[in-house]
Amino acid sequence: YESYQKMPYLSFFDLLERLPVAWHILVLVLVTSLAASSIDTLQNALASVFSKDMVAFGAVREKNMGKWIARVIIVVLNIPAIIVAAKQFSVLSLFLVADLVCATAVLPVFLGLITEPFLFGMIPPPTEVGAVLGTVCGFATVLIYGAVRQKLGIWDGKVTNWAGEVVAEGTWSYFW
């Protein structure tokens, strides 16, 4: 691994390769269970928040009706997720876009947690709308910065790895 003939992040698979097939199956089952439980937890949390908010805002009169509407919303939200999964996008590129969204959202969201004016009352606390707009503006800034660099010829739109091979090309490759 020190000579970079093998990728260090694939070392687990090198260890797994030498084991019997039964271990491969066990690891596959455990990894699938881990991913499924993460998604299950996310879907339950979203359904809970949706049903609670529908009852709190008076969108439904009965608690059970809010629960069923929330479940239908979750099923509808799963349809685009299944379509994206069927297209077999690179998981790494999806994680990188998710990291970009998180990186642009962290500062506005934390600033949105401030509830009292600061700097001797001269600056009012941000609102929830301000936090969302701050995230959107941060994301747009990164896109515009990449486009300007590409138009000025500072960056050719290609991302290369340590060996000089092009690993990504195009608008989203700037986030690689």
Image: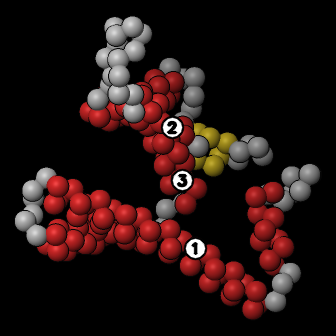
Q: Label 3: how many residues lie within 10 Å, few (<14), some (14-19) or many (20+)? A: few
Q: Nearer the viewer, mark 3 or mark 1?
A: 1
* x, y percent for residue 159: 62, 41
* Left or right: 131 in relation to 172: left
Q: Label 2: how many residues lie within 10 Å, few (<14), some (14-19) or many (20+)? A: some
Helix, strand or loop status at disc 2: helix
The residue closer to the viewer here, 35 or 7, is 35
Helix, strand or loop status at disc 3: helix
Q: Which residue is drawn at 39% across and 33% down?
A: 113
Residues at marks 3 and 2, CA–CA distance in whole angstroms: 12 Å
Residue 92 vertical position relative to residue 51 in the rendered view, above or below: above
Residue type marked 3: Phe
* x, y percent for residue 46: 33, 62
Residues at marks 3 and 1, CA–CA distance in whole angstroms: 17 Å
* Left or right: 114 in relation to 98: left
Instruction: Name the quadrant of the C terminus.
Output: top right
Q: Name the residue under label 1.
A: 34
Tell me, for residue 95, which label it has, or none. Answer: 3
Q: Label 1: how many residues lie within 10 Å, few (<14), some (14-19) or many (20+)? A: few
Write down the quadrant of residue 74 in the picture: bottom left
The residue closer to the viewer here, 140 or 28, is 28
Tell me, for residue 137, which label it has, or none. Answer: none
Q: Residue at x 45, y 42 (%)?
A: 101
Residue type marked 1: Leu
* Left or right: 119 in relation to 152: left
Q: Name the residue under label 2.
A: 103
User: Are the residues at dot 2 and dot 1 in contact (C-beta closer than 8 Å)?
Assistant: no
Residue furthest out toward the right: 3
* x, y percent for residue 158: 59, 39
